[in-house]
Amino acid sequence: MNFEKYNIPADSVITIAGMVGAGKSTLTNALANALRFRTSMEKVDNNPYLDKFYKDFSRWSFHLQIFFLAERFKEQKKMFEYGGGFVQDRSIYEDTGIFARMHYDKGTMSEVDYDTYTRLFDAMVMTPYFPHPDVLIHLEGSLDDILLRIQKRGRQMEQETPREYWEEMYDRYERWISEFQMCPVLRININDYDLINDPGSVDRIIEKIGQKIQLKREVRL
């Protein structure tokens, strides 16, 4: 694979968004391997709040979101300081657009905590100096397909989460991506490719990414 073949500059930053279980990590690694890019993976194993959060949303939602905000902010800056050439698993934009807002609306994050979080997010991210990706890939599919993937993955904290939580998140993702404007968006259905049994299907995705990035850079000129 050669990134020039698909008009993807070597300094590109590609971010992948989508619900838990949609296959972000799998696609991140497949794209990075094909393009010889670095990866920026979501920090899960070293998150001190994640297990606690799934047991008590109200107690730990603010702490969890602040941790993710700090980690993703550092990662996003690092990618551009390296000069690009990254595929990123999970975007910083989902935190405020979906997760923090969902907990505030449902009463599992207080008004004071939500206001503090959004003020901090805006000060860090919503400025002319914060670098945004060349393209954001949104992985989507039916809720049943995504829940099946979550079940197969077998993480206990996710298995114990009520279906109503996933339904709420699914609806919010749909609304969020339809309004997202921070960078070009490429929407991909998870049933349109199979990276496990058909590794070559990544080529079709890369071709679409290249078209999005090229169009964006032409608009800049």
Image (cartoon, rainbow, N blue to C red):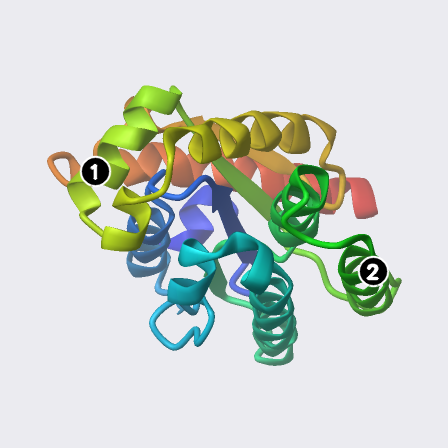
Provide residue 5's location: percent of width, then percent of height. Answer: 41, 46
The local crowd at label 1, few if under 14, some if 14 to 19, many if 20 or more residues have their Cα within 10 Å, is: some
Q: Is residue 214 above or below residue 145?
A: below
Asked if one can make out residue 42 in the rendered structure from this viewpoint, the answer is no
Residue shown at 27%/40% (left/top)?
150
Residue shown at 86%/63% (left/top)?
119
Disc number for residue 67: none
Between residue 148 and residue 78, name the one nearer to us. Answer: 148
N-terminal of the pair, mark 1 or mark 2, is: 2
Asked if the residue under mark 2 is in contact with the one under mark 1, i.e. CB atoms within 8 Å, the reply is no
Which tag is nearer the camera, tag 1 or tag 2? Answer: 2
The quarter of the picture where residue 140 lies is top left
State left or right for residue 32 relative to residue 117: left
Between residue 160 and residue 192, name the one nearer to us. Answer: 160
State left or right for residue 90 relative to residue 61: left
Residue shown at 47%/70% (left/top)?
49
Whole-angstrom CA distance, mark 1 to mark 2, is 35 Å
Q: Specify the amino acid type for callout 1.
A: Gln
Residue shown at 79%/40% (left/top)?
219
Q: Specify the amino acid type for callout 2.
A: Val
- Count of marks, rendered view: 2
State left or right for residue 212 relative to residue 195: right
Between residue 188 and residue 17, name the one nearer to us. Answer: 17
Please tell me whether mark 2 sits on a helix, a strand or a loop: helix
Provide residue 166's location: percent of width, then percent of height. Answer: 44, 33
Q: Is residue 30 above or below residue 188?
A: below
The local crowd at label 2, few if under 14, some if 14 to 19, many if 20 or more residues have their Cα within 10 Å, is: few
Q: What residue is shown with label 1? A: 151
Please tell me whether mark 1 sits on a helix, a strand or a loop: helix
Q: What residue is shown with label 2? A: 112
The quarter of the picture where residue 60 lies is bottom right
